[in-house]
Image (cartoon, rainbow, N blue to C red):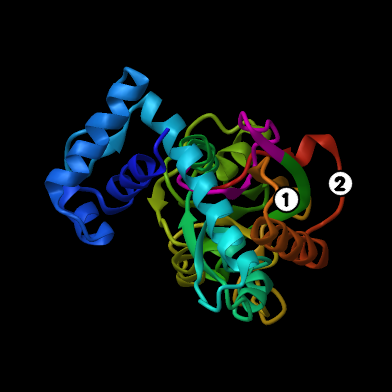
Amino acid sequence: MNFEHLRALAAIIDEGTFEAAADLLGISPSAVSQRIKALENSVGQTVVRRGVPCAPTEAGAVLLRMARQVQVLEAETRRALGNGVSSRAVTPVAVNADSLITWFVPVLHEAAGWTDTTLDLHVEDQDHSSRLLRQGDVIAAVTADPAPVNGCRVERLGFMRYVPVAAPALHRRFTTAAGVDWAGMPMLEFNAKDDLQRQVLRSRSVDRLPPRHTIPSSEGFLAALRAGLGWGMIPELQLGTELADGTLILLEEQAHRDVALHWQTWSLESERLNRITAAVRAASRRRLRTARQDDRRTAQGRP
């Protein structure tokens, strides 16, 4: 397969249109179209869904992944040849929002010293992370999914603990002599796929869901908790002095959830990929829990 054809495919998916891909590659839109037609003729299948933005077909996703791998190897080969040209290779990685603002931060500090690599971070939930790996949009991902994507390797990083908290005023309004009124107290959700709060309610046999507010931001989620908008599950790593100074109240000691996180990467021998894997592994060992408390409290986590 002609690598220039694969390069055109990657450019179209990255830039969204044939015209933008042509600008990136420094050729005409007609030349980009001709390369894609040649690629489709060579594999006997359509590889790009024309639209705004363009998207890969199932066959195109397979080719796109190969194109990414070749790009990684090409960048490392050029560096190994030492032709005196200094260039940075883009390293796309998927990471969930809660990890990004907590234990993943040391990875960013370490990456600041890499002169041959630029990070392209995709903040996605576990389902999207798997999809991004399959179609070649990222070469590695932090995910709650322990099953490796085809062609990838996976290792467990550790466990992120989430604890249920609320502002003191909200806690007082919905606490009786019998305890917390889980069915009445408003709750927060990160998005529609965030099941952590509902797991707590189910474990307390609460069938009727309380009023729910959607806050699709890790920083905004904590701010909404402080404001008393609702209760929610927050990573213990994200909490500072809120519990100690009374800004937030821990609703129940035994209602935490331990979420297993994994690191999935392409099964590709790459110095850059090995470097970021080592950084992620070291950061997770410093901050994540190494073992869950018990099987009942191990959960699928927030995106």
Identified at 52% across, 43% down, the residue is 129
Q: Which residues are magenta?
A: 136-153
Q: Sequence order check: which comes first, mark 1 or mark 2?
A: 1
In the image shown, does 211 or 159 lie closer to the viewer? 159
Q: Position of residue 280 (x, y in %)?
A: 71, 61
Looking at the image, do the residues carrying marks 1 and 2 touch, with CB atoms under 8 Å apart? yes
Identified at 39% across, 52% down, the residue is 213
Query: Which residue appears farthest toward the top when viewing the image?
Result: 44
Q: Quadrant of residue 107?
A: bottom right
In the image shown, does 300 or 66 lie closer to the viewer? 66
Q: Is residue 59 visible?
A: yes
Main SS of the magenta part reads loop
Crowd tier of the residue under label 1, counting other residues whose Cα lies within 10 Å: few below 14, some 14–19, many 20 or above: many
Instruction: Name the disc covering residue 293, or none.
Output: 2
Looking at the image, residue 199 lies above or below residue 279:
above
Crowd tier of the residue under label 2, counting other residues whose Cα lies within 10 Å: few below 14, some 14–19, many 20 or above: some
Looking at the image, residue 271 sits to the left or right of residue 88; the answer is: right
Disc 2 element:
loop
Instruction: Name the disc covering residue 32, or none.
Output: none
Asked whether 107 falls inside the magenta stretch, the response is no
Q: Position of residue 275 (x, y in %)?
A: 71, 63
Looking at the image, residue 173 lies above or below residue 43:
below
Residue annotated with mark 1: 256
Looking at the image, residue 256 lies above or below residue 46:
below
